[in-house]
Amino acid sequence: EPKTIGQRGAFIVIEGLDRAGKTTQVKRLCDKLYSQGHNIKTLRFPDRTSPIGKMIDSYLQSQTEMDDHVIHLLFSANRWEKAKWMEETLKKGCTIVCDRYYHSGMVYSAAKHNPNLSLDWARAPDVGLPKPDAVIFLDLEPEEAEKRGGYGDEKYEKKEMQQRVRELFYTFESDMKVVNAGESLEIVGDHILEKIEETLKDVLEGRSRVGKF
Ligand code: Z5A
């Protein structure tokens, strides 16, 4: 019997640096929660499948150039495309586990050091989106990321950029539960579960409503 029937689902976001293992941990977490009887849906941002997502993909692969504000607004629009679906899904009792969300949106754009693109400016288009019940931040030392094969070929996968992104993520420390992603897959997975246990309980027992950013 699924645990979430008749209750809303929980909205869990896994944020993190490049190579931190977000995709791996989202999958582990979903398998675990599913085995505990939760109805589960996953999401990832950017969602590269929609027309807006395809524009983002093309930008990240350096096939298209865009003004920093334009790409920022597309990333935000890509979340808004899913907002109604997220609200309906949570209401139906499904738990959503989401790979990156608006914290990524704010910090990657602000990390570009464009004097006309502050963290405040970057925040504005996401205001009003469904607010996660818990945000896990998978933190990885740059040296550890390098051991995992270094950064890839996409636009932001450069050491200096990743360093600024990490510092900016830490300005949101009070919004997030930090997990050291440098440990083994199993240990990281266990720490994530520990950190969301309380949240899941509150949601399942009807003590918490879906908020807005
Ligand atoms: N971006 C943005 O600017 N604005 C926005 O609003 C949003 C995003 C939403 C693409 O994101 C870029 O978009 C990203 C942020 C920006 N730019 N950067 N950087 P993405 O999410 O599509 O792509 P990504 O960050 O590069 O994700 P990824 O490649 O999927 O990485 P990951 O999910 O964190 O890691 P992984 O694939 O699970 O693992 C990476 C490797 O490490 C792999 O070989 C694993 O086997 C290994 N791994 C994982 N965990 C461990 C442990 N614990 N030990 C050892 N090895 C491990």
Image: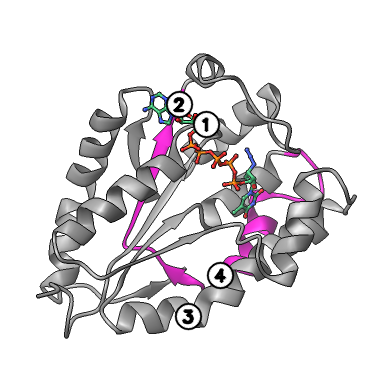
Instruction: Specify whether tag 4 is near ligand 1 (CB below 8 Å).
Output: no
| Residue marked by disc 2 | 140
Tell me the SS state at disc 2. loop
Instruction: Please identify the quarter of the rendering in which residue 96 is found.
Output: bottom left
From the viewer's perspective, is residue 188 above or below residue 131?
above
Ligand 1, seen in the image, is in the quarter at top right
Image marks 1 and 2: residues in contact by CB distance under 8 Å: yes
Q: Amino acid at mark 1?
A: Arg
Please tell me which of labels 2 and 4 falls first in the chain.
Answer: 4
Residue at figure coordinates x 15%, y 71% from the top left: 204
What residue range appears in magenta?
112-140
Can you give x and y, in whole percent of width and height, for residue 154 in the image? 73, 37
Q: Amino acid at mark 2?
A: Leu
Which mark is drawn over residue 127?
A: 4
Please tell me which of labels 4 and 1 falls first in the chain.
Answer: 1
Instruction: Specify whether tag 1 is near ligand 1 (CB below 8 Å).
Output: yes
Tell me the SS state at disc 4. loop
The single residue placed furthest to the right in the displayed view is 65
Please tell me which of labels 3 and 4 falls first in the chain.
Answer: 3
